[in-house]
Amino acid sequence: MDFIRFKKSIPQNVNIIAVSKTKPVEKIKQIYDLGHKDFGENKVQELIKKHEELPDDINWHLIGKLQRNKVKYIAPFIHLIHSVDSEKLLSQINKEGDKNNRIINVLLQIKISNDPLKTGFDFSELEKIISSDKFLEYKFVKVLGFMGMGSIDQSKNEEEFRKISNYFNKTSKIYDLKYLSLGMSNDYKLAIKYNSNMIRIGSLIFGFRN
Ligand SMILES: *Cc1c(COP(=O)(O)O)cnc(C)c1O
């Protein structure tokens, strides 16, 4: 696809994360050479390898499940972790941020779908966490917003997106949140309609994955 044309079709306030998982560095370089800097991966090992091989000024986003024992590998350079789905993980990221003397930006993943493989906080859990004092003790983590993934059954997406969007609108001013990471290749238009300002686009940019 024509990446430049795609970019032009997206409202300017919406950040595009080019999801490059399983794709070779040459393909990433092609998009990078068009001036794009934000790339997303879902596996730590693959992300580290690509980070080593590609230019330093790429903003790397982790969008997949993160195990606590792997935080240390990405802590020195990660731009944004979209997939924080537990308090234990948050605490571990804070620890590694401290060690690296940098504040690590994260999004809290909200479970908006009942699909078995999709994780994240429930809305009620989330409310407890972001309003707790403990939250303020995480000096090396900055929560910039929320991430959500719609159900595979697309007929459910509108209701799911409306819910997370309402919650984001309600909380963003109180907690100084910037990003709602919502929408992939097949549902980004709907996500943007529901206030998403960060879309994670893989197959539409890089072609289908095996
Ligand atoms: C793979 C992936 C995407 C991109 O999916 P496409 O359908 O290829 O756009 C977005 N978000 C997450 C969390 C992913 O794992």
Image: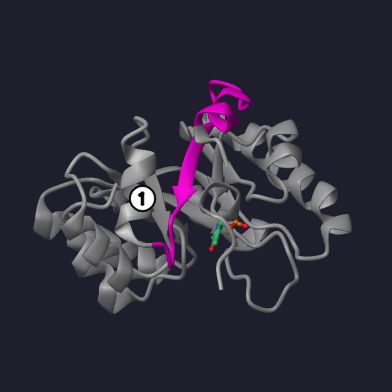
Residue 73 percent coordinates (x, y): 20, 68
Q: Which of 32 and 153 is in front in this view?
A: 32
Label 1 belongs to which residue?
A: 28
Can the viewer see residue 80 in this picture? Answer: no
Q: In this rendering, would 23 be left or right of 79?
A: right
Say whether residue 203 is magenta: no
Say whether residue 12 is magenta: yes
Q: Report the amino acid beneath label 1.
A: Ile
Q: In this rendering, would 157 be left or right of 27?
A: right
* Quadrant (top left, top right, bottom left, bottom right) of the N terminus: top right
Report the span colored magenta.
Answer: 4-23
Can the viewer see residue 143 in this picture? Answer: yes
Q: Which of 102 and 184 is in front in this view?
A: 184
Q: Which residue is drawn at 76% across and 40% down?
A: 190
Question: How busy is the neighbourhood of tag 1: few (under 14 within 10 Å), some, or many (20 plus)?
Answer: many
* Quadrant (top left, top right, bottom left, bottom right) of the C terminus: bottom right
Which image quadrant for residue 192? Answer: top right
In the image, residue 204 sits, relative to residue 6, either above or below, namely: below
Residue 65 percent coordinates (x, y): 46, 70
Residue that extends furthest to the right in the rendered view of this protein: 155
